[in-house]
Amino acid sequence: VLLWDIYKWKTAGAKIRLLVQSGMQMIGDPQRENLTLVTSRVTNIGDRPTTITTIGFKYYKNWWQKIRNKPNQVYVVPNPAFNHQVLPYILEVGQEWLGGTNQTKDLEKMAKEGYLIMEVYDSVHTKPSSGRVIINEKST
């Protein structure tokens, strides 16, 4: 019983699942219709709510810097929300939040030449949830 209680204690709380996608196009929104986006889909798969506070990027020129967690550049996305889900945003259990930013030539270059990592910070965890941005060449 003690082991079960320890397991429940360790697994309780908010848990964030992050899906990062590049090359996304938005339709139905005249302001973003011709833009290419890097999006983040954040889902709370835990048993308690959390608040998404910040979204950003870290860029590492090579794998050695990534292993040592020594980024060459760090970015914060000031207004990453779509569909009026502005930050900070309370993410209830089972709920999704969708955000992102424009996929600029600079972001594409960083993702192709090194390691571009998108990070989502929330109010429960001390370390952010992260996912690598991978740019796929469009087939013609």
Image (cartoon, helix red, strand yellow):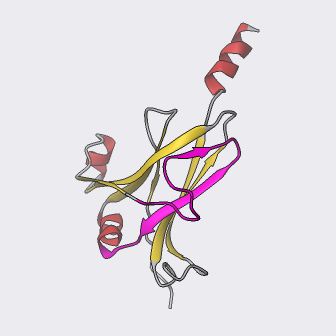
Q: Is residue 118 above or below residue 29?
A: above
Residue at left 27%, top 54%? Answer: 62
Q: How many marks?
A: 0
Question: Where's residue 119, x and y in %?
Answer: 43, 49
Residue at left 65%, top 19%? Answer: 9
Q: Is residue 96 visible?
A: yes
Q: Nearer the viewer, residue 62 or 13?
A: 13
Q: Is residue 56 above or below residue 29?
A: above
Please give left or right for residue 56 compared with residue 21 in the image: left
Q: Is residue 121 above or below residue 14?
A: below
Quadrant location of residue 109? Answer: bottom left
Q: Nearer the viewer, residue 71 or 64?
A: 71
Please give left or right for residue 92 compared with residue 29 in the image: right
In the displayed orientation, state which residue is furthest to the left.
72
In the displayed orientation, state which residue is furthest to the top.
2
Question: Where's residue 43, x and y in %?
Answer: 63, 49
Q: Is residue 43 magenta?
A: no
Q: Nearer the viewer, residue 32 or 61?
A: 32
Question: Where's residue 139, x and y in %?
Answer: 50, 86
Please provide the residue range marked out in magenta: 79-105
Q: Which quadrant is the N terminus positioned in?
A: top right
Q: Is residue 80 magenta?
A: yes
In the displayed orientation, state which residue is furthest to the right.
1
Residue at left 62%, top 22%? Answer: 10
Q: Is residue 120 visible?
A: no
Residue at left 51%, top 45%? Answer: 52
Please give left or right for residue 100 compared with residue 43 in the image: left
Question: Where's residue 4, x and y in %?
Answer: 73, 15
